[in-house]
Image (cartoon, rainbow, N blue to C red):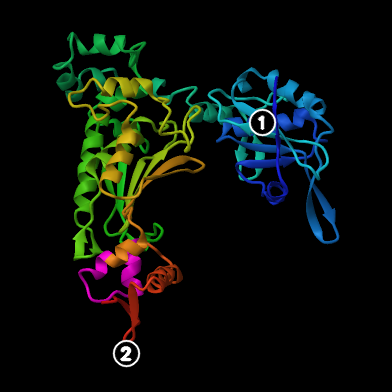
């Protein structure tokens, strides 16, 4: 294959030699066996993707470990590594390669960018690996491999058969109400069988989630939504819980709408300091709705954990069990689609006023809604076992503008008030904001005996 050769300067070389190995970066010497490198390739492809620099050595000296550029003699010298990658069908299209050369350095470094794969990628030893921190760890047994299949969305827990009576979903109030709006209509059991949510006279997980009146009785600890309110801006600690966690239950359709109503009601009771004094906190309801819908419909139901909504004084965190499926990463989640639970997504869309009206547009809608309220865009984080979306109550306006807006309606501002307004947590960082405004001659400091220093606008 044709691989680009890119020349880099001294500054870029210095930066490369300072790179730390991490969950997303690995450095290897050219002497590594191609079969051993295949473990790192497998780990990155099976987890979140990453980068490999082949030709950056570490050497132990009296002064400590020193990083050195020690690349391949030429491009052909790296052929054995390309042969390993090309021989792995599940790696096809999931990596990009380039060679790096530098005027004062020895040889060329092979830079590989590995993308998250749709399928499980195995190393040459026929084992799958995953990335954890700066390590590539083998998937130890068949049970762990099965978890990886669910994580990647190759296999969906929604298709698992449950040992409960068919009447659990075929004669429920939920399915009877639902069937009244189905065109063409029919008998519930026949229709559910045709939709493959009843198989061999047994309901599937998707069938119970959608059509049981109380899925939580069958799918305990993996089908409800827990709502927690913490009266703090810091981490979630039991001491800051305002009340006992609320558990929302019911079939998927009502579960989503009921949870959004509960969350909105709690948020309406929170106030935040603004230019006009204490103001009600506002989050766009469509952002809450879309993110909660995503958390329920795209979660990994193989993970025995409920969706959690954690409401803080300055943010809302919505945690969905299971890692991002397929090739989806936190970087491409807005621009790509992958349904881990396609039956759930398709069939809930048949309900009247479905929660997923615009399939595939949920997160885009949430981002746009936050922007319209001039709030910062949501943060999306992936942990070892979940995906967390964070809605921050932080204005898109600069801290300096927020300070000036406050002083247009109030005589003075202190560091504590400034931190409340801007969401800045560090006292020193807030001071820097005041100093920048002082240096541009827009505010001046006020010192009164017995009072904390404050700032006011220069008249």
In the rendered image, which residue does mark 1 sit on?
41
Residue 367, disc: none
The magenta region covers 405-422
Q: Position of residue 246 (x, y in %)?
A: 26, 48
The image shows residue 49, relative to residue 94, as above or below, that is below
Residue 450, disc: 2
Which numbered disc, 1 or 2, marks the residue closer to the eye?
Answer: 2
N-terminal-most mark, 1 or 2: 1
Magenta part, dominant SS: helix
The image shows residue 47, relative to residue 448, as above or below, that is above
The image shows residue 452, relative to residue 219, as above or below, that is below
The residue shown at (22%, 72%) is: 410
Compared across the picture, whether 419 is left or right of 278 comes to right
Judge whether residue 412 is colored magenta: yes
Q: What quarter of the picture does the N terminus occupy? A: top right
Q: Nearer the viewer, residue 195 or 13?
A: 13
Compared across the picture, whether 217 is left or right of 140 comes to left
Q: Nearer the viewer, residue 169 or 29?
A: 29
């Amino acid at each position: 294959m044709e691989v680009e050769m890119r020349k880099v300067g001294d500054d870029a070389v210095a930066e490369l030699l300072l790179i730390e190995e991490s969950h997303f970066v690995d450095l290897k010497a050219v002497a590594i066996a191609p079969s051993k490198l295949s473990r790192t390739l497998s780990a990155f492809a099976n987890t979140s993707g990453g980068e490999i620099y082949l030709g950056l050595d570490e050497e132990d000296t009296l002064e400590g470990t020193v990083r050195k550029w020690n690349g391949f003699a030429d491009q052909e010298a790296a052929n054995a590594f390309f042969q390993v990658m090309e021989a792995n069908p599940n790696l096809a299209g999931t990596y990009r390669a380039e060679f790096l050369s530098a005027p004062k350095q020895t040889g060329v470094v092979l830079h590989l960018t590995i993308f998250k794969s749709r399928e499980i990628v195995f190393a040459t030893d026929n084992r799958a690996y995953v990335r954890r921190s700066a390590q590539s760890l083998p998937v130890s047994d068949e049970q762990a491999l099965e978890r990886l299949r669910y994580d990647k969305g190759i296999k969906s827990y929604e298709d698992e058969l449950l040992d409960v009576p068919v009447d659990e979903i075929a004669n429920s109030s939920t399915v009877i109400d639902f069937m009244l709006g189905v065109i063409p209509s029919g008998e519930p059991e026949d229709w559910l069988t045709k939709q493959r949510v009843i198989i061999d006279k047994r309901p599937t997980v998707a069938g119970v989630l959608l059509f049981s009146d109380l899925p939580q009785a069958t799918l305990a600890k993996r089908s409800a939504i827990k709502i927690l309110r913490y009266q703090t801006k810091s981490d979630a600690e039991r001491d800051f819980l305002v009340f006992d966690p609320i558990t929302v239950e019911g079939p998927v359709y009502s579960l989503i709408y009921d949870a959004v109503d509960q969350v909105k009601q709690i948020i309406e009771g929170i106030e935040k300091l603004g230019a006009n004094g204490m103001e009600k906190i506002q989050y766009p309801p469509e952002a809450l709705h879309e993110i909660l819908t995503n958390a329920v419909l795209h979660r990994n139901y193989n993970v025995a954990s409920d969706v959690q909504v954690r409401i803080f004084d300055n943010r809302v965190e919505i945690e969905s069990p299971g890692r991002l499926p397929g090739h989806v990463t936190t970087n491409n989640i807005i621009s790509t689609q992958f349904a881990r639970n396609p039956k759930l997504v398709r069939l809930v869309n048949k309900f009247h006023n479905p929660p997923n009206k615009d399939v595939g547009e949920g997160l885009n809608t949430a981002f746009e809604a936050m922007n319209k309220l001039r709030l910062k865009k949501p943060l999306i984080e992936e942990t070892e076992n979940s995906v967390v979306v964070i809605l921050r109550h932080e204005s898109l306006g600069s801290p300096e503008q927020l300070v000036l807006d406050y002083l247009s309606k109030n005589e003075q501002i202190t560091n504590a008030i400034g931190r409340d307004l801007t969401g800045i947590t560090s006292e020193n960082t807030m001071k820097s904001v005041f100093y920048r405004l002082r240096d541009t001659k827009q505010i001046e400091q006020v010192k009164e005996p017995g009072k904390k220093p404050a700032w006011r606008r220069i008249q």
